[in-house]
Image (cartoon, rainbow, N blue to C red):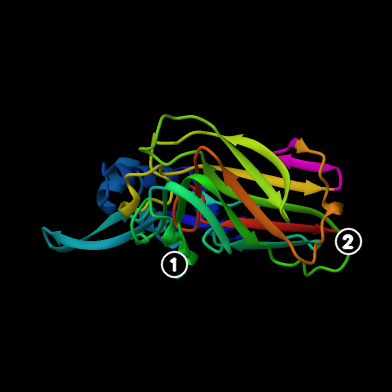
């Protein structure tokens, strides 16, 4: 999979795929219908020279590579796809009046969880599942997945570095109500706190088992593969969850020099981090200033 964290990084890819002919050539290579330069030229009704130029563009964009295979007269070059999936983050631009941080989902300073529960990195489970003791292990900082039946995680948020009044605080994360294999699909009520004040609650969707996440980990194949990307925002007018107002609490009520954020659930929650799920990130914290 190709993953671009901003639009500018994907410029070469976009230029490459701007050509309908290269799109068709890439589709032929992906399907295996034509992979040699000769076969591509015959299928596309193009000269070998034109095919060579298109293949160079596809290779330069990171979509394919050329490998040598035995042929009738020595060796022949064959096109092999490198990726079958492309992800471009289009909303990652940091503006002048903003600070943006990504904090690992395992960087909580307090965890009170009850089984079923588990924590895992991209290399597999930390300790044994359904044992809350492993939430204290240092390896948790590399967590790619955390889930629990009921409990709370609390994080220290980065102190805003920008000068001027803090006008908004946003936290975005990939979440689902349950990992696969634990109960039926249902929504879960999630509670959010800022500095130990409940700023709102909202339900999140059930387990998503129809496919693997864009960032799949073989060691975690027996759990839910992805969640939904959600954002809670508190500003001068209230607190919002994906744009829906969930409480009247405003940012002006809080001491911004020391911010702690808690996320809790009573009937199941799965939190996805770097390297697993559909989004290769932890908890994205954004502060806005006047």
Which residue in the protein does label 1 denote? 137
Q: Is residue 202 magenta?
A: no
Q: Quadrant of residue 213?
A: top left
Mark 1: give few (<14), some (14-19) or many (20+) Cα within 10 Å. few
Outermost residue, left direction?
Answer: 72
Q: Which residues are magenta?
A: 236-245
Percent of width and height locating residue 171: 67, 52
Question: Horizontal placement of 276 versus 109: left or right?
Answer: left
Camera-nearest residue between 109 and 2: 109
Percent of width and height locating residue 260: 69, 59
**As displayed, is residue 138 above or below residue 58?**
below
Q: Quadrant of the C terminus?
A: bottom right
Camera-nearest residue between 217 and 237: 237
Residue 93 visible in image: no
Which numbered disc, 1 or 2, marks the residue that appears first in the sequence? 1
Q: Is residue 240 magenta?
A: yes
Q: Residue at x 67, y 55 (%)?
A: 261
SS type, badge 1: loop
Could you tell me how far apart the alpha carbons at marks 1 and 2 are, in whole angstroms? 37 Å
Percent of width and height locating residue 151: 54, 48
The mark lying in front, picked from 1 and 2, is 1
Mark 2: give few (<14), some (14-19) or many (20+) Cα within 10 Å. few
Question: Horizontal placement of 238 versus 77: left or right?
Answer: right
SS type, badge 2: loop
Camera-nearest residue between 187 and 221: 187
**As displayed, is residue 284 above or below residue 236?**
below
Q: Residue at x 58, y 52 (%)?
A: 89
The secondary structure that most of the magenta stretch takes on is strand
Residue 102 numbered tag: none
Residue 165 numbered tag: 2
């Amino acid at each position: 999979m190709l993953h671009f964290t901003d639009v500018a990084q994907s410029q070469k890819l976009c230029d490459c795929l701007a050509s309908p002919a290269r799109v068709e050539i890439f589709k032929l290579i992906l399907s295996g219908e034509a992979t040699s330069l000769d076969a591509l030229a015959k299928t596309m009704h193009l000269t070998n020279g034109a095919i060579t130029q298109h293949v160079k563009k596809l290779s330069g964009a990171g979509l394919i590579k050329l490998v040598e295979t035995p042929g009738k007269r020595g060796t022949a070059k064959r096109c092999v796809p490198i990726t079958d999936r492309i992800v471009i983050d289009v909303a990652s631009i940091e503006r002048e009046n903003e600070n943006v941080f990504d904090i690992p989902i395992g960087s909580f300073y307090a965890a009170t969880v009850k089984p079923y529960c588990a924590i895992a990195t991209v290399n597999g489970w930390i300790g044994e599942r359904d044992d809350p003791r492993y939430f204290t292990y240092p390896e948790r900082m590399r967590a790619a997945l955390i889930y629990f039946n009921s409990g709370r995680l609390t994080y220290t948020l980065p102190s805003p570095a920008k000068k001027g009044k803090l006008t908004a605080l946003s936290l975005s994360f990939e979440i689902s109500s349950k990992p696969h294999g634990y109960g039926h699909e249902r929504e879960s009520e999630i509670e959010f706190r800022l500095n130990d004040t409940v700023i709102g609650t909202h339900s999140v969707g059930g387990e998503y088992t129809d496919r693997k996440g864009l960032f799949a980990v073989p060691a975690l194949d027996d759990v839910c593969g992805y969640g939904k990307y959600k954002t809670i925002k508190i500003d001068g007018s209230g607190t919002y969850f994906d744009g829906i107002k969930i409480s009247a609490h405003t940012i002006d009520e809080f001491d911004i020099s020391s911010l702690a954020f808690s996320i809790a659930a009573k009937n199941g929650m799965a939190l996805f981090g770097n390297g697993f799920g559909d989004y290769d990130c932890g908890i994205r914290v954004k502060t806005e200033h006047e």
